[in-house]
Image (cartoon, rainbow, N blue to C red):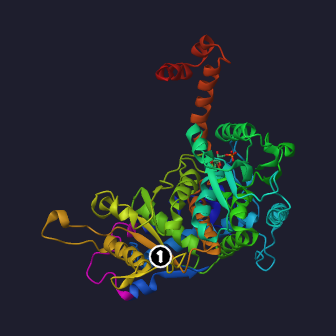
């Protein structure tokens, strides 16, 4: 393959998965992938052998369509594309968010630094160009710790001297999905009497619904926007500020903000406290920065929030693991590449058997699809191979009663990633007809995984299920803050590994700009800030849009 395979310094953008020798081997193997439906194909030995464990999670992948030679070729692919070295370059602060030879973000990728807060968990290499990011993260964490203590010790209270009970997080995309998913996952760990609410949509009903029923006098509002210029967030901030003004409550005593230093929102006079995030942290990777830190810290307290960071940090360090088959995020990435590129399966269902993870698939949808839904390589060329899958999912067992028909029998094969926990979060369970609810939940998870793999033959064609539906099971003891941090980082690092192997930039998001620009043009027209005749003459697309807008 191109230059890359040589020793010493290499330019990651020159790595092409398609020209790796291992890729050719994988294409050969993909002509006859392991048949999970064959009698005895799912032997206990196989289930026991195709298993990897790290950071409290076990990955069972005997139900994927792989065998030892597939795994060997996938590992060789990782070596040929220098995946681990590239990952280390990310963590060491190299400028990896870029497209060579074209205008691009040209940034480091250092969400890892937001959890580099533990002296007992150092990186096994010189932090080099990432050192400043870790220092900045620790500075923000200190600010957060102080603020949370002030809330706890009632040094920061409302005008009547009462403690704050509620916090409304105003933000969208990466400034909403991750924090929301993590908050919902960790509800049982909340401090007594603390609740967090989320407003994201520019639909005014979102804010109206959240604000109804809140005692604003005891509510903090956390406005989160890295750019400080997102239309939805600024609009919602105005709606919520208006509600406070109507209630004769001074917003600057209730409003917090998380934004980029120097952004249009960086005006500490308007806020009770301002926290910062940085250009080297992408929105969808920002849940462990102050973007998630303020709302999660308010809900859980500082110590529990740092447990979450510790779980993520342990996984980041584990992601450097060299031993073949032992690096969990890399293994997940490689199995995903096998399904996506070699077996040609375009979607991925993430199915958590955990009510706490009710919004986790929504977060992963953004994390994966915005990162790896790319058609251009880091050299600016058209990507020759398919990249990120369409990610979707819902918690089990609810999903079983909804869309599992399709994943069992449709001609569209959907790879599935199951996630489960041995124990429930609340521990409130009962033996009903000989088993607990938690046992029923886990039995369903394992049964679905096996059923998808093996299928079923029947004389009745309508009761025939073809099987060979690749899937894996990720399992841990309990969904704690630490486990949540680890799970989050497992997926973040899986997505990053896939992008590195595909040679795409997983850290920009040009594709979300186009519609935004058009909407702004239409709004210009609605406010009359640009004469209609001028728009019609100069901009045929906006002209067409205005025609369409007549239905409004
Ligand atoms: C995430 C994206 C995007 C972003 C939102 C909000 O990676 O960049 O979802 O998080 O558009 O942006 P702001 O935080 O700048 O308001």
Instruction: Kindly give the residue lying farthest to the top in the view shown.
Output: 533
Does the image show residue 375? yes
Residue 220: x and y in percent read 73, 52
Q: Residues within 10 Å of mark 1 (few under 14, many from 20)?
A: some
Residue furthest front as drawn: 160
The residue drawn where x is 20% and y is 67% is 464
Q: Position of residue 55 (x, y in %)?
A: 62, 79
In this rendering, is residue 116 above or below 534? below
Say whether mark 1 is within 8 Å of ligand 1. Answer: no
Q: Nearer the viewer, residue 53 or 204?
A: 204
Mark 1 highlights which residue? 71
Predominant secondary structure, magenta span: loop
Name the side, left or right, on which 517 lies relative to 388. right
Count of residue discs = 1
Instruction: Give how far across and how far down residue 152 sits, in percent.
Output: 79, 66
**Magenta segment: does it hold 2?**
no
For the point 63% across and 53% down, the residue is 197
Disc 1, SS? helix
Q: Is residue 9 visible?
A: no
On the rendered structure, is 216 left or right of 72?
Answer: right
Q: Quadrant of residue 284?
A: bottom right
42 is within the stretch colored magenta:
yes
Image location (x, y in percent) of residue 292: 69, 59
Q: Which residues are magenta?
A: 28-44
């Amino acid at each position: 393959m191109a230059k890359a395979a040589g020793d010493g310094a290499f330019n990651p953008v020159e790595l092409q998965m398609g020209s790796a020798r291992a890729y050719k081997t994988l294409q050969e193997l993909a002509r006859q992938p392991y048949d999970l439906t064959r009698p005895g194909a799912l032997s206990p030995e196989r289930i026991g052998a195709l298993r990897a464990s790290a950071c409290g999670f076990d990955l069972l992948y005997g139900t994927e369509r792989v065998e030892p030679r597939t795994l060997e070729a996938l590992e060789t692919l990782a070596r040929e594309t220098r995946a681990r070295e590239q990952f280390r370059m990310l963590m060491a602060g190299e400028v990896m968010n870029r497209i060579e030879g074209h205008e691009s973000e040209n940034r480091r990728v250092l969400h890892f630094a937001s959890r580099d807060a533990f002296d007992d968990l150092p990186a096994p290499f010189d932090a080099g160009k990432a050192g400043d990011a870790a220092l900045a993260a620790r500075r923000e964490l200190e600010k957060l710790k102080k603020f949370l203590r002030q809330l706890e010790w009632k040094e920061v209270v409302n005008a009547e001297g009462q403690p704050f009970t509620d916090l409304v997080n105003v933000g969208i995309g990466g400034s909403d999905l991750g924090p929301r998913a993590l908050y919902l996952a960790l509800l049982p760990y909340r401090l007594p009497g603390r609740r967090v609410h989320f407003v994201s949509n520019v639909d005014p009903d979102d804010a109206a619904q959240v604000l109804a029923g809140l005692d604003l006098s005891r509510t903090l509002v956390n406005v989160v926007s890295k750019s400080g210029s997102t239309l939805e967030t600024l609009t919602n901030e105005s709606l919520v500020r208006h509600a406070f003004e109507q209630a004769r409550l001074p917003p600057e005593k209730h409003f917090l903000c998380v934004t980029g230093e120097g952004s249009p929102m960086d005006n500490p006079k308007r806020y009770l406290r301002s926290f910062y995030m940085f250009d080297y942290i992408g929105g969808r990777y920002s849940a462990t920065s102050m973007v998630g830190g303020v709302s999660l810290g308010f809900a859980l307290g500082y110590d529990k929030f740092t447990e979450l960071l510790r779980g993520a940090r342990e996984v980041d360090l584990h992601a450097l693991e060299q031993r073949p088959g032992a690096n969990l995020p890399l293994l997940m990435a490689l199995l995903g590449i096998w399904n996506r590129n070699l077996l040609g399966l375009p979607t991925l269902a993430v199915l958590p058997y955990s009510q706490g993870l009710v919004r986790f698939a929504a977060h992963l949808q953004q994390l994966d699809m915005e990162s790896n839904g790319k058609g251009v390589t880091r050299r600016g060329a058209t990507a020759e191979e398919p990249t990120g899958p369409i990610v979707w999912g819902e918690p089990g067992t609810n999903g079983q009663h909804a869309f599992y028909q399709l994943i069992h029998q449709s001609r569209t094969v959907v790879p599935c990633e199951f996630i489960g926990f041995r124990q429930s979060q609340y521990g409130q369970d009962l033996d009903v007809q000989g088993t607990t609810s938690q046992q029923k939940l886990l039995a369903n998870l394992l049964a679905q995984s096996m059923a998808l793999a093996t299928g079923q033959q029947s004389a009745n064609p309508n009761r025939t299920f073809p099987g060979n539906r690749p899937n894996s099971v990720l399992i841990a003891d309990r969904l704690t803050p630490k486990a949540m941090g680890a799970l989050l980082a497992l997926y973040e690092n899986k997505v990053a590994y896939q992008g590195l192997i595909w040679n795409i930039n997983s850290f920009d998001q040009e594709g979300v700009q186009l519609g935004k620009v058009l909407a702004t043009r239409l709004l210009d027209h609605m406010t009359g800030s640009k004469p209609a005749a001028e728009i019609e003459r100069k901009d045929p697309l906006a002209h067409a849009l205005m025609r369409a807008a007549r239905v409004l």
